[in-house]
Image (cartoon, rainbow, N blue to C red):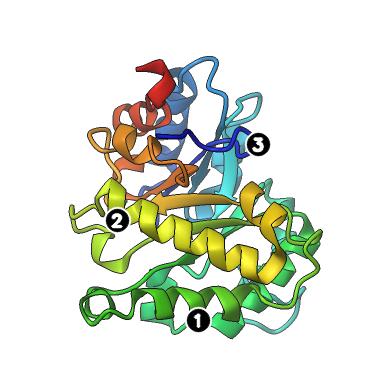
């Protein structure tokens, strides 16, 4: 088995969703800064709720762990009650932002056109965008996985200058694997990641595609991270439930690459 392209630094991102109060958030990142393995060659990020961004950012000062947000709105400022702009996220110390998470798509009706606008705003503000795509169980069972991924990728990513899109990260998160304890097998995930890479090549050429980081998300745990990361097109993980505990998240960050085993 070939290992991942060395130009794609592994990225392990924790998506806290709507969890943890301020005290618990700070305790978690303090524990993480101690527990994240020294010499880790990749990047680590946590995405707390908006209300915890500044305290978590403060607790992460002088730490290699980066701060991310879970969503943004594309307008710069104005009468958009309840929304947060890309520049406000930058101001709060964010390095990255998740876009188009399946919970946003399903519960809050985010569309591919919205993903595209949010992506544009994130890039303009200098945030690393993590665009999430993935099929539902019904779509997988009715053989529509590839069509769904193609539609989400085209709808969200089309029409940028390839150089502007260079910081892009894509997360493949099969909806049926999120929070269900049912992880995609490494082979299923690899197949989807390869498909996503081919779509990226069709949109922006092979050089862009071979440098694109594609994370897997959906019930990632300390038990399955090593086998997922052994796949050549899996460049990291977007972790929900298992990112809420310092011991499980730091074990995921310390995944053993095939070469080290
Ligand atoms: P999970 O969530 O790890 O709890 O399945 C992943 C995600 O939704 O990003």
Q: Is residue 13 above or below residue 114?
A: above
Residue 128 locus on image (x, y percent): 66, 53
Q: Is residue 159 above or below residue 9?
A: below
Q: Which disc, if any, is residue 220? A: none
Q: Quadrant of the N terminus?
A: top left
Could you tell me if the residues under marks 3 and 2 are in contact, i.e. CB atoms within 8 Å? no
Q: Which residue is mark 3?
A: 7
Query: Dot 3: within a 10 Å radius of its alpha carbon, few (fewer than 14), some, or many (20 or more) residues?
Result: few
Query: Dot 2: within a 10 Å radius of its alpha carbon, few (fewer than 14), some, or many (20 or more) residues?
Result: few
State which tag comes first along the sequence, 1 or 2.
1
Query: Dot 1: within a 10 Å radius of its alpha carbon, few (fewer than 14), some, or many (20 or more) residues?
Result: few
Task: Judge whether residue 246 can be spotted in this image.
Answer: yes
Give the residue drawn at x 53%, y 22%: 40
Give the residue drawn at x 41%, y 26%: 257
Residue 177 locus on image (x, y percent): 25, 60
Q: Secondary structure at mark 2?
A: helix
Residue 88 locus on image (x, y percent): 71, 60
Could you tell me if the residues under marks 1 and 3 are in contact, i.e. CB atoms within 8 Å? no
Residue 161: name its quadrant: bottom right
Marks 1 and 3, Cα distance to the nearest angstrom? 27 Å
Q: Which residue is mark 2?
A: 188
Task: Judge whether residue 18 can be spotted in this image.
Answer: no
């Amino acid at each position: 088995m070939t290992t991942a392209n060395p130009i794609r630094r592994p990225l392990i991102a924790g998506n806290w969703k709507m969890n943890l109060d301020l005290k618990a958030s700070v305790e978690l990142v303090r524990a993480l800064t101690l527990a994240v393995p020294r010499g880790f060659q990749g990047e680590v990020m946590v995405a707390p709720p908006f209300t915890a961004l500044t305290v978590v950012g403060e607790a992460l000062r002088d730490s290699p762990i980066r701060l991310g947000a879970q969503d943004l709105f594309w307008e710069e400022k104005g009468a958009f009650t309840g929304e947060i702009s890309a520049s406000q996220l930058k101001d709060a110390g964010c390095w990255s932002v998740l876009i188009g998470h399946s919970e946003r798509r399903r519960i809050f009706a985010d569309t591919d056109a919205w993903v595209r606008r949010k992506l544009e705003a994130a890039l303009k503000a200098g945030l690393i965008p993590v665009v999430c795509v993935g099929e539902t169980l019904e779509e997988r069972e009715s053989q529509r996985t590839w069509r769904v991924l193609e539609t989400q990728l085209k709808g969200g990513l089309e029409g940028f200058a390839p150089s502007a899109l260079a910081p892009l990260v894509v997360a493949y998160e099969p909806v049926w694997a999120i929070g269900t304890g049912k992880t995609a097998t490494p082979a299923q995930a690899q197949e989807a990641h390869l498909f996503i890479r081919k779509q990226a090549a069709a949109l922006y050429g092979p050089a862009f595609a071979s440098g694109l980081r594609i994370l897997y998300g959906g019930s990632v745990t300390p038990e399955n991270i090593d086998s997922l990361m052994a796949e050549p097109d899996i460049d990291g993980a977007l972790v929900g439930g298992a990112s809420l505990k310092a011991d499980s998240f730091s074990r995921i960050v310390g995944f053993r690459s095939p070469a080290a085993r």
